[in-house]
Image: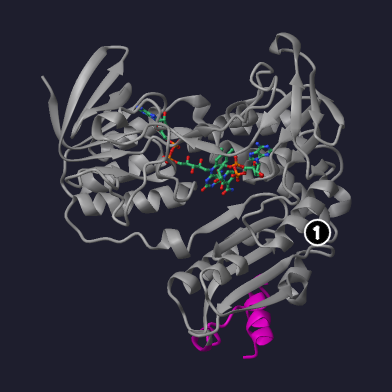
Amino acid sequence: MAETFDVVVIGGGPTGENVGARAAAAGLSVALVERELLGGECSYWACIPSKALLRPAEAQWLARHAPGVGETVKGAIDARAVLERRDAMVQGYKDDSQVKWAEGAKLTVVRGHGRLSGPRTVRVEGSGGARELMARKAVVLATGSRPRLPDVPGLKEARPWDNREGTAAKQVPRRLVVLGGGAVAVELAQAWRSLGAEVTLAQRGRGLLSRFEPFVSQEVEQALRDSGVTVRLGTQATRVERPGGRGEVTVTLSTGEVVRADELLVAMGRVANTAELGLETVGLTPGKPVEVDDQLRAKSVEGGWLYACGDVNGRNLLTHMGKYQARLAGDHIAGKEVRAWADAKATPQVIFTHPQVASVGLTEAQARERGLNVRTVLTSLGSVAGTSLLGPGLGGTAMLVVDERRRVIVGATFTGPGIGELLHAATIAVAGEVPLDTLWHAVPSFPTVSEVWLRLLEAYGL
Ligand SMILES: Cc1cc2nc3c(=O)[nH]c(=O)nc-3n(C[C@H](O)[C@H](O)[C@H](O)COP(=O)(O)OP(=O)(O)OC[C@H]3O[C@@H](n4cnc5c(N)ncnc54)[C@H](O)[C@@H]3O)c2cc1C
Ligand SMILES: NC(=O)c1ccc[n+]([C@@H]2O[C@H](COP(=O)([O-])OP(=O)(O)OC[C@H]3O[C@@H](n4cnc5c(N)ncnc54)[C@H](O)[C@@H]3O)[C@@H](O)[C@H]2O)c1
């Protein structure tokens, strides 16, 4: 006999938890199906542990630049203490506190692998057997993503690290090769280097973090080199050898260079978790992201009962954007009118390297592709007293992309120490379409790094 709920959510990561909580807060009954740990990839093997691994290196870097302090900060980071802190931040890979939270939010947690077995029905297979769940109003797919493993000869057999081992390893490898040049690659390369590993990063493209403004790539490359990471650009692995999948790994690059290491980390993008989700029972194609409309409903499924939020829909693979979609989907299921527009024009992101990278909205290239008449302004972070006070040698760059027709900011990018905390001002300006002439009256305090906003507006001509 099927158990009936108003809403059945498959996947209890940050997205699934939030959509469930939002719907439950509106008075709907919600089943939250999770096959592993409530809290998802983000809590245990992605955002949280990677930031826990990176934070000490940033603190050390900032302290070393602080006048009068730098000289006192000598020696290497205590890797054991950092790994212990990481373990604490991931709650020892246990989800008791998240379960408690979910129960407090009136969600019924169902353990097991969920899959659609037809319209509005979900079959859950867990250790206690199979259960059939029926959804009166909606089924929400929030199953996230998994790492993409390219078809490089010998790569799979070499048993490489992905984001799981790359964030959960119990020991620091002596030598680490990182394949990829996106967010995961740059963050984890710098993290493991700071803990003592010799790191070589090999990236196929000509630059790192290619989705950002081009200056970001150059600055992050320099920062990685300054941290002691060996960076190889415009190259990719053509062969990987590791007899028996253990011990030394040998990576041959397309340039002919051979790199030997103790571990190999693959950070080459993600694949939506839709392969074993029963999508075929409702006319969708397994293995691909579930395409959604602006109400987060799966396109081409009749009746509007199937939603997909977070990494699984491929819109924006970021926790905060998954949670944004989740809030809107939860509201829509509860009967409110919603439209998810921030995805397309005001997505913020912070890369937690030192220096940090923070951006929101469109890059100059994206804005031009959309046919906007744009003008950019660029300034150095070092131009304000707030940055100088952090210490000599700390700088960065700030850039705005302005839509000339409307005189509003459509994109902003910053690099610099702790700059992620400056981003929300830009996100408000972009999402709120605040006219530049109004922004001129948003006075930043002296002497904060935020005064860079003044320099940017002056550079624009205000
Ligand atoms: C190393 C790394 C660092 C990152 N750092 C950041 C960061 O700093 N900031 C940021 O915003 N983003 C970051 N991300 C991206 C972020 O982790 C994802 O965008 C986020 O986890 C997506 O949340 P989600 O709920 O959609 O999916 P997930 O977190 O992947 O959760 C999906 C859940 O669904 C469960 N599940 C899957 N299939 C089924 C099924 N059939 N039945 C039952 N349960 C199922 C899974 O077990 C999992 O618990 C990082 C990613 C990586 C890899
Ligand atoms: N701080 C953050 O916000 C943060 C941190 C980590 C991850 N994330 C998110 O998680 C997602 C996954 O990150 P990611 O770094 O794995 O993916 P990504 O898409 O950001 O980067 C993938 C990288 O792999 C390279 N690549 C892809 N295929 C390749 C191939 N066959 N050979 C060689 N190189 C190849 C690409 O050039 C690119 O540099 C991203 O969407 C990212 O935004 C966010």
Q: Which residue is mark 1?
A: 66
Instruction: Name the residue located 53 percent from the left edge and 37 percent from the top edge.
Output: 270
199 relative to 362 in the view: left or right: right
91 relative to 322 in the view: left or right: right
Instruction: Name the residue located 29 percent from the left edge and 26 percent from the top edge.
Output: 115
Q: Is residue 379 above or below residue 26?
A: below
The part of the image, by quadrant, that contains residue 404 is bottom right
Q: Is residue 451 visible?
A: no
| x and y, in percent, of residue 71 in the image | 89, 52
Q: Is residue 439 magenta?
A: yes
Instruction: Name the residue located 70 percent from the left edge and 22 percent from the top edge.
Output: 153
| x and y, in percent, of residue 455 in the image | 68, 81
Q: In this view of the protein, which residue sits in the foreground, 456 or 116?
A: 116
Q: Is residue 283 above or below residue 113?
A: below
| x and y, in percent, of residue 145 in the image | 47, 35
**Of the residues shown, which amino acid type is indicated by label 1?**
Ala
Q: Is residue 348 above or below residue 37?
A: below
Q: Residues within 10 Å of mark 1 (few under 14, many from 20)?
A: some
Q: Is residue 439 above or below residue 289?
A: below
Q: Which residues are magenta?
A: 437-462
Q: Is residue 63 visible?
A: yes
Q: Tell me the quadrant of the picture where the N terminus can be found.
A: top left
Q: In this view of the protein, which residue sits in the foreground, 205 or 165?
A: 205
For the residue with label 1, is its CB less than 8 Å from the closest atom of ligand 2? no
Q: Is residue 107 magenta?
A: no
Label 1 element class: loop
Q: How is the image coloured?
A: one colour
| x and y, in percent, of residue 335 in the image | 16, 55
Residue positioned most to the left:
1
